[in-house]
Amino acid sequence: MPRSLVMGGAGFLGSHLCDRLLEAGHEVICMDNLVTGSADNIAHLAGDRFQFINHDVTRTIQVDGPLDYVLNFASPASPVNYLKLPIATLKVGSFGTHNALGLARAKKAVFLMASTSEVYGDPKEHPQAETYWGNVNPIGPRSVYDEAKRYAEALTMAYHRTHQVDTRIARIFNTYGPRMGIDDGRAIPNFFKQAWTGKDLTVYGDGRQTRSFCYVTDLIEGIYRLLLSSEHDPVNIGNPKEMNLLEMAEKILQVTGSQSKIVFKPLPTDDPKVRQPNIARARELLQWQPQVDLDQGLRVTSEYFKSQLGGD
Ligand code: UDP
């Protein structure tokens, strides 16, 4: 039975990854300090093949016994959270990733780094392919996340080249679905909460900035296939269907049937104007592409947020 460590396993993506690995027959150790993750996300997972360890991965990580896979999903990931936790975000991307790579090396485990489309910054190439080096402000407020992830990618490649660690790098684009933190400040949770509670939907800027949203089960399937591949260079995982934020707000009003209005608020500093993955590499290497369409994904997500608000 493969034995896997999921760092950040109580987070939005980490918990879905635990689900997927358990389904594939792994024994799963979930490590999280619950700073942005939640015990509720893994409450359904208690059992023989699942173990939770409350630990801050910026401190030395000790795991008894063998490990086949180490998956590093530990980090605040929403702009509101990483702006509240700037130094913790830099530390988890640097020290946390260093500890994880050291552990993977010692255990001769495959290592997978959850990187991000934020490595492309406010991109000057559109859509973004893995060959694009990005346009990141190294001292702006978002740099605590962007540069930590860029450093984590550099460290991952250095461990691969120097110590022959069997590494993978997933560049994850915007993802949504059940277990997103309702108060994490991202557009989709904000819009749902506002729609369900009769508040105005807050669109930042003129709402013409774009994102491309992937449903969580699609994303996790891409990650799982990358893990089983032998690809060391970064691979974009995301849904190429691009839309602007005003369209997303309108879509959420439609899905919820809410009478809320849309209001415009200032655009945060360095907010990327466009974002869309080029997934040609994932298609070719992993035979993967998203399956869930936006209406379908938003309906399930809507029910989740409604239940979080005590609405059913
Ligand atoms: N956004 C918005 N209203 C909100 C929250 C976010 O219009 O209440 C915008 C934000 O400015 C950005 C986009 O939605 O352009 C996506 O933001 P999010 O925080 O979800 O993630 P990002 O893609 O910026 O990491």
Image (cartoon, rainbow, N blue to C red):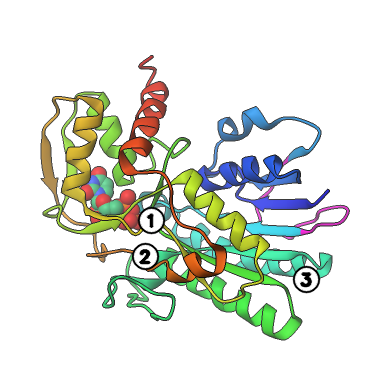
Examine the rendered structure and indicate whether residue 296 appears above or below residue 60.
above
Mark whose residue sits in front, 3 or 1: 1
Give, as a single range, the part of the protein colored magenta.
Answer: 52-68
Q: Looking at the image, is mark 3 or mark 1 earlier in the sequence?
A: 3
Which residue type carries mark 1? Asn
Residue hosting label 3: 105
Q: Which label sits in the foreground, 3 or 2?
A: 2
Q: Which residue is mark 1?
A: 239
Q: Amino acid at mark 2?
A: Pro
* Chief secondary structure of the magenta portion: loop
What is the residue that sits farthest to the top in this orientation?
312
Does any atom of ligand 1 lie closer than 8 Å to the CB of label 2?
Answer: no
Q: Nearer the viewer, residue 113 or 129?
A: 129
Give the distance between the C-alpha atoms of the residues marked 3 and 2, in whole angstroms: 31 Å
Give the mark, 3 or 2, whose residue is nearer the N terminus. Answer: 3
- Asked whether the beta carbons under mark 2 and mark 1 sit within 8 Å of each other, the answer is yes
- Tell me which amino acid carries mark 3: Arg
Q: Residue at x 23, y 29 (%)?
A: 195
